[in-house]
Image: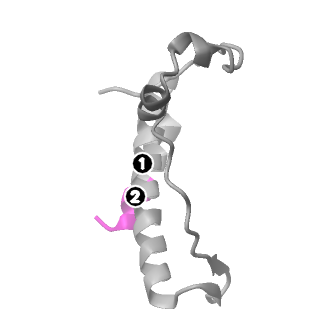
Amino acid sequence: MTEVQATIQALATVESLTNDIDTLAVLDKQVKDLTAKCKVLKDSIANQFGEGKHRGEKYGVRITIENRKGAVDMEALCKHFGITEAQLDAFRGDTVAVIKVAATA
């Protein structure tokens, strides 16, 4: 089965599903697969062309290289300066509710 045939079959499967949970599971899997494929393509394009603007037949890309500072290790920082959880709470924003929905097998 070709990739196009597999995609058409997967889309047909999604269209035929009537349960939102099943649809979420199928779409979530497709998103993960596409995300992985995009990462491979981006890495390949960046390595092949380097920084700058580049054109394909129809579309273009802009490749930039950024150097970012690493994350602050808050646990080590607090320990080093003797900052307590209560002291941190004085600078903490409001509590918010977060609802996560993840497809499972």
Residue 6 in the magenta stretch? The answer is yes
Circles 2 and 1: CB distance less than 8 Å?
A: yes
Q: Quadrant of the C terminus?
A: top left
| Identity of the residue drawn at 61% across and 76% down | 64
11 vs 24, nearest the viewer: 24
Residue 46 visible from this viewpoint:
yes
Residue 61 position within the rendered picture, expressed as x and y whole percent measured from the top left = 64, 79
Residue under the point 45% across and 56% down: 34
The magenta stretch spans residue 3: yes
Q: Residues within 10 Å of mark 1 (few under 14, many from 20)?
A: few
User: What is the distance, in whole Å, between disc 2 and disc 1 at their CAs?
Assistant: 6 Å
Q: Give the range drawn in magenta.
A: 1-8
SS at mark 2 in the image: helix
Amino acid type shown at disc 2: Ala
* Residue ID for mark 2: 36
Task: Left or right? Give the position of 92 relative to 1.
Answer: right
Q: Which residue corresponds to mark 1?
A: 32
The percent position of residue 57, horizontal first and vertical second, equals 63, 89
